[in-house]
Structure formats: C-alpha cells, structure tokens
C-alpha cells in the first residue's frame, strides 16, 4: 500500500506571484511538442517550415487552454460556474477537459490549415504524435494536484489519498500518464516514422486515446457532481471518448481504402 506524498501544488512564490506545478506541466508539454515537431519536420515530408511549426504550437496551445477550460465548464460542472463565473479563470486549481481541449485544437488547426493552404488532415497527421507527451505532463500535473483519483482497490500499489479518505485507491492519474502519454507516444512515433496514407496517423491517435481513456475510466472515480452517466457504469469520460474511437476507426478505414 502506498501513501500519496502530499506535494505542495505551488512550486515557488515570488511575492504575490505563485507558480503552480500544474501550469508548469502544461508549459513542459508545449515545449516538448515544439521540440518534437522540429525533429519530426526534419525526417518526415518537410511541408512545414520552422516558423510554421512554431505557429502550429502557438495555435495549438491556445486551443488546448481555451478549449480545455470551456470543455470542463460545459461537460463537467456547468451549474457551479454559472453560480460563480470567476472560477472559470482559476485554471491553476485544475479543471481542464481533454475533450474540450481536443475540440479547441481541431478548430485552431482548421483555421491555421486554411491560412497556410494545406489540407486539414495533413496538419493533424503531423501533430498527432506530438500530443501524448503533453498528455503525460498534464496527468502528472493532476497527480501533483491530488485530483482525479481512482476507485478503491486491494492491489499492492493501491494508494491512500489522505485528503480524500483512508481507502487504498487506484492511482488512475499515473495509469493515464503511462497509457495516454508514454505508450501512445511510442505507438504513434514509431507508426509515423514511415510514410502513411493521409488520415492514418490521426485515426490511430483517436483509436489509441479513445481505447486507453475508456479502459482507465473503469478504475477512475467518477466525478462527484456527475456520477455515472448511463447504465450504472458509464462515466462522462467514457461517453466522450467513445465517439473518438469510432471516428478513429472510420479515418483508418478511409485512409487505407482510398490508398
């Protein structure tokens, strides 16, 4: 049995300015994505210049932050934010939705693809392998914040989160960091090293994320304000991930059937 280490969510403070681990994890995720994009641009079809790659990361960052926050507000806790709208801006306390951020990035990439006159799926195929390490950093931020803990377990690595209760629970944040982050990154990075038909890399990302998120939700505690959405077992995360899995399968089928 493990004990949650009670990490201070504030990394350091300079006067009134507080630098939170959660925000730092997002910065690390964007920095990793930028570095990987530059590397990817060297060995893949070089359709993007270094300046365009920097713009892609900038547009994506805006999509992640704005979409992720609005997605959490709309999908997970709308009544609370209607009652206290100022809470929307307190992002250092957590409360970011992957699915909202995903929609935000898609909108940003659609706008940027039109700006530089490239096909939308050429752009999403390029950025898809960059995303998982950002997800890994974000899930570590969730763990440091002591949020999104798992359901009770009697497994040897069950972790007690003292700020929740004294019951050993799945460290589901770390499961997601491993699967959605490291494992998915390796799969996509290896897959994308060879030329693939357009939409294939994007499709594989959706299949991989949708599958891993759907599975981990079985051991992650449902959001208290929502509980189970359907069938006494389906969570909001599973409900939102299922369409990603279906669309990913369709994109893979289209990619290889058109080829």
Image (cartoon, helix red, strand yellow):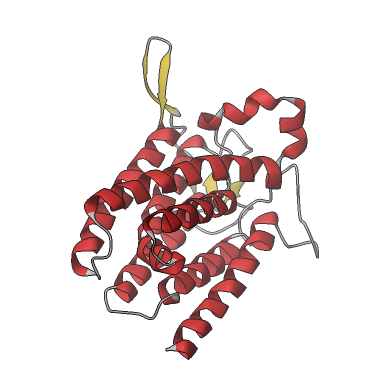
Q: Is residue 196 visible from the viewing direction of this image?
A: yes
Farthest left residue in view: 42
Report whether 202 appears left or right of 98. left
- What is the x, y in percent for residue 14? 35, 13
Along the viewing direction, whichever of 222 and 255 lies nearer the viewer: 255
| Residue name at image x 55 percent, y 69 percent | 211
| Residue name at image x 44 percent, y 68 percent | 121
Along the viewing direction, whichever of 86 and 197 lies nearer the viewer: 197
Task: Give the quadrant of the C terminus.
Answer: bottom left
Choose top left, top right, bottom left or bottom right for residue 192: bottom left
Farthest top residue in view: 15
Q: In this view, does 114 lie above or below 205?
A: above
Q: Is residue 152 above or below residue 209?
A: above
Q: Is residue 3 visible from the viewing direction of this image?
A: no
Report whether 85 appears left or right of 19. right
| Residue name at image x 39 percent, y 47 percent | 137
- What is the x, y in percent for residue 89? 58, 28
- What is the x, y in percent for residue 60? 43, 48
- What is the x, y in percent for residue 66? 54, 40
Choose top left, top right, bottom left or bottom right for residue 26: top left
Along the viewing direction, whichever of 190 and 34 lies nearer the viewer: 34
Q: Is residue 77 above or below residue 247?
A: above
Give the total of numbered labels. Answer: 0
């Amino acid at each position: 049995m493990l004990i949650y280490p009670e990490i201070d969510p504030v990394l350091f403070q300079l006067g009134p300015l507080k630098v939170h681990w959660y925000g730092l994890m997002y910065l690390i995720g964007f920095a990793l994505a930028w570095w990987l994009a530059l590397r990817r641009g060297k060995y893949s079809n070089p359709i993007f210049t270094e300046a365009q790659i920097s713009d892609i990361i900038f547009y994506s960052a805006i999509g992640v932050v704005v979409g992720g926050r609005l997605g959490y507000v709309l999908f997970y806790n709308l009544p609370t934010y209607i009652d206290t709208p100022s809470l929307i801006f307190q992002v250092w306390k957590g409360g970011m939705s992957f699915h909202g951020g995903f929609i935000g990035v898609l909108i940003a990439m659609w706008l940027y693809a039109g700006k530089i006159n490239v096909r939308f799926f050429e752009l999403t195929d390029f950025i898809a392998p960059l995303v998982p390490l950002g997800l890994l950093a974000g899930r570590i931020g969730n763990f440091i914040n002591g949020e999104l803990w798992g359901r009770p377990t009697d497994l040897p690595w069950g972790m007690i989160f003292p700020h929740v209760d004294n019951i050993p629970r799945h460290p589901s944040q770390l499961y997601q960091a491993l699967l959605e982050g490291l494992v998915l990154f390796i799969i996509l990075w290896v897959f994308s090293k060879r030329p693939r038909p357009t939409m294939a890399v994007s499709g594989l990302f959706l299949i991989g994320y949708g599958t891993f998120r759907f599975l981990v939700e079985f051991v992650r505690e449902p959001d208290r304000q929502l509980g189970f959405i359907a069938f006494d077992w389906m969570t909001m995360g599973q409900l939102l991930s299922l369409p990603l899995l279906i669309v990913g399968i369709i994109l893979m089928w289209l990619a290889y059937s058109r080829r």
